[in-house]
Amino acid sequence: MTNFQPTMRRFITLIVLMGLINLMACSDSKDMEIQPFQPPSLASYQDPGTASWEVVPPEDLIDVCGLDPDILAAIDAVNTYSYAVVRYGKLCHEFYHPDDPGRDEMAHNFSATKTLGATAVGRAAFMSVDLPQPLTDMDRMDSWVGDITFNPDAKVAHVMAMVAFNESLAFGQKIFSYDALGTREINRLSDVIEAVIAQDPNQFDGATTTAEFAQREIFNKLGMSTSNWGGEIFGITWYSNLRDMARLGLLLIHNGIWDQRRLLSEEWVYKMTHPSFEDANTGYGYLTWVAANSNYTLPGFDNKIQTPLGSCQPYALWPKYPHPPSDSTECNYDGAASCIQAFDVGTFAAAGLGGQLIVGHRGLDLVIVTRNAGNLAFISTPWKLIRSALIAHDPVYSGDEVAFCEAYSSGDYAPDLVTNQ
């Protein structure tokens, strides 16, 4: 039977949005203060739990996923890399290029592992709240591990934001430098996880190592049956198939909730997917890339980049400044763009060498993952690939990509944002 829930959801969204559009006609949306995210009920999110994903049949794609099957088929006919699309918690579409690993084969995710690592630290923090020493992102690293080779004042947050190596952690003094292999500081996060576990292994289902912890608390709970992560090289050693990559992305766009259970705190997910220290890099959260307008740094570039990081996607902005742990008094866009949005739905990505991507669009309840999309592929690459298939059936901007992108990228349009309203 066809699932009409997303269709009804889009119909209700249309009614609400028409009222919002009328309201915006009477006021400048850029004068609206961004509203902090209010977590909804656990049952508001859809996911497969631990069950296998079934691909939505092409004839049901419009009703179930709001995606056009003919446009996707045309994309597949010429596309040069594998990808999968998840929307409303459903595996809507997947395509495997003949030169790539197949559906059930594991492949190296390279630095996309870093976002998995931030998730693992967040899970350990969430589970440690009743232990003698709970873990938080504001803890000093030396309160958990010894022999610090980087700034001794560095907190867990500094390590996950790639700034812990700096001699000074003062505002305006931090320089972002990508610890690609993890050998400089982020491998110590594995030691942090194991120090947390050592307080009471029974609390962690008997796990003693980061690898065991990840298997039991992330892979098993999310039904990631085709994943392996040793944890010994924290930032680059996750192997998986595309479907498991998508499950991790879905957990994050759903605010840390899976199978109607909270696995991560909403605050932790928020910090992962928003800029950590705007003075260092507007495009990086906790071991996760985020969409930025300007003043962001990418690996291999010495200077900050002043052109938008991709098109037709909302930037990740905080509702107010300063915010913990940053001391920045604004978004650090230097007048290039507004620091205010109507909807707090900035795009984020886990990104690995060669185009191993997990891209999350919370405002569209959308995750796109890629395999071997190329060394130049980044946060907007898979979105640019498939967005015409989504815009074709958008409830407000059907087929009008220019109007859709203007509203969506400015943060004024988020038709599928799950809230508690």
Image (tube, helix red, strand yellow):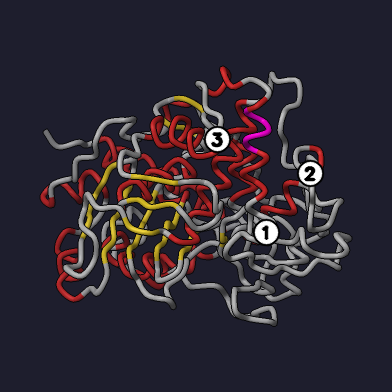
Name the spot of residue 233 as percent of width and height, x first: 55, 53
Dot placed on the residue nearer the N-terminal end, 1 or 3: 3
Specify start and end residues of the magenta stretch as a single range: 193-197
Name the kind of residue labelled 3 in the image. Thr
1 or 2: mark nearer the eye: 2
Query: In the picture provided, is 45 more to the left or to the right than 63?
Result: right
Q: Quarter of the image for the N terminus: give it.
A: top left
Q: Badge 3 local density, few (<14 within 10 Å), some, or many (20+)?
A: many
Q: Which residue is mark 1?
A: 340
- Alpha-carbon span between mark 2 and mark 3: 17 Å
Name the kind of residue labelled 1 in the image. Ile
SS assignment at label 2: loop
Q: Which residue is mark 2?
A: 146
> Is any atom of residue 31 visible in this view?
no
Q: Which residue is mark 3?
A: 209
In-front residue for pair 76/144:
144
Name the kind of residue labelled 2 in the image. Gly
In-front residue for pair 195/132:
195
Q: Badge 1 local density, few (<14 within 10 Å), some, or many (20+)?
A: many
- Alpha-carbon span between mark 1 and mark 2: 41 Å
1 or 3: mark nearer the eye: 3
Name the spot of residue 365 as percent of width and height, x first: 40, 47
Q: Badge 2 local density, few (<14 within 10 Å), some, or many (20+)?
A: few
In-front residue for pair 241/294:
241
**Residue 47, numbered circle:** none
Marks 3 and 2: in contact by CB < 8 Å? Answer: no
Name the spot of residue 140 as percent of width and height, x first: 81, 43
Dot placed on the residue nearer the N-terminal end, 1 or 2: 2
In-front residue for pair 6/144:
144
Name the spot of residue 146 as percent of width and height, x first: 79, 44
Marks 3 and 1: in contact by CB < 8 Å? Answer: no
